[in-house]
Amino acid sequence: MSLLETKGLKKIYGSGDNAVNALDEINITIEDGEFAAVVGTSGSGKSTLLHMLGGLDRPSSGKVLIGGKDIFSFKDEELTIFRRRKIGFVFQAYNLVPSLNVYENIILPLELDGEKIDNDFLNKIISTLSIEEKLDSLPNQLSGGQQQRVAIARALISKPMILLCDEPTGNLDSKTSQDVLSLLKVSSERFSQTMIMITHNEAIAQIADRIIRIEDGKIQLK
């Protein structure tokens, strides 16, 4: 069963002779529980695609359907709420709140929504990511790999329909990158989490169930 689908997705920057087709008629389908990697070189359109899939930017035309809902039919406030409740994000820069400890960073999305914490699920996430002993630590007391684990936990805690990862190992050394990738794979399997990872690295993409290649704003068919 498809969870996410794009139909004729286009993003054009500029106009006239200066127009750039960042995305050109993107049609993809992601199945429920699938772990997909979108691979492309710098400037290929992969990050623009992720921003569209996550509702962070609106397309020039076309649709993004998540759970059968066209997310761009929502008004801005509705889209913000949908994004917070249904879409998890893991970015290269971690984006943790420096004044909050690990536990507070993880539960932040639930607190913003006034949602009750599912402690059993929280404990499973913390155990899976091996950050039990860091809950009282501030982000600046953690290594890059530990910060990314916290970012993954924060993205999972609201049980999103889909998790979007933008170059999640970009700031990490090779060994830590492998550890984080393994944790993403385990999280995908253990929590049946639908996941899309953006990367420029073909080797990293191999961990996914399926690889989608993009170049010059177009999906490359085999």
Image (cartoon, rainbow, N blue to C red):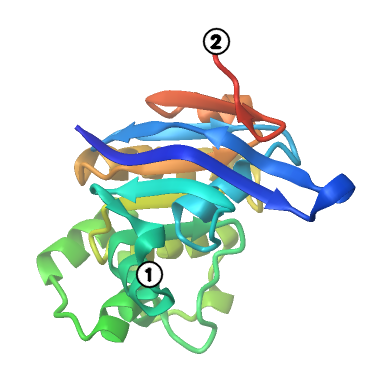
Q: Who is closer to the viewer here, 125 or 81? A: 81
- Residue sitting at the far right: 17
Q: How far apart are marks 1 and 2 (CA)?
A: 34 Å
| Amino acid at the residue labelled 2 | Lys
Place residue 119 in its image quadrant.
Answer: bottom left
Q: Mark 1 Cα within 10 Å, few/some/many (few <14, many 20+)? A: some
> Which quarter of the image is occupied by the C terminus?
top right
Nearest-to-viewer mark from 1 and 2: 1
Q: Which residue position is annotated with label 2?
A: 222
Q: Who is closer to the viewer here, 214 or 13? A: 13
Image position, residue 16 (x, y; %): 84, 49
Res 124 label? none
Determine whether the residue tagged by mark 1 lies in a helix, strand or loop.
helix
Q: In this view, does 3 lie to the left or right of 57?
A: left
| Amino acid at the residue labelled 1 | Leu
Dots 1, 2 in contact, CB < 8 A: no
- Judge whether 53 appears above or below 28 on screen: below
Image position, residue 31 (x, y; %): 28, 33
Res 79 label? 1
Determine whether the residue tagged by mark 2 lies in a helix, strand or loop.
loop
> Which quarter of the image is occupied by the N terminus?
top left
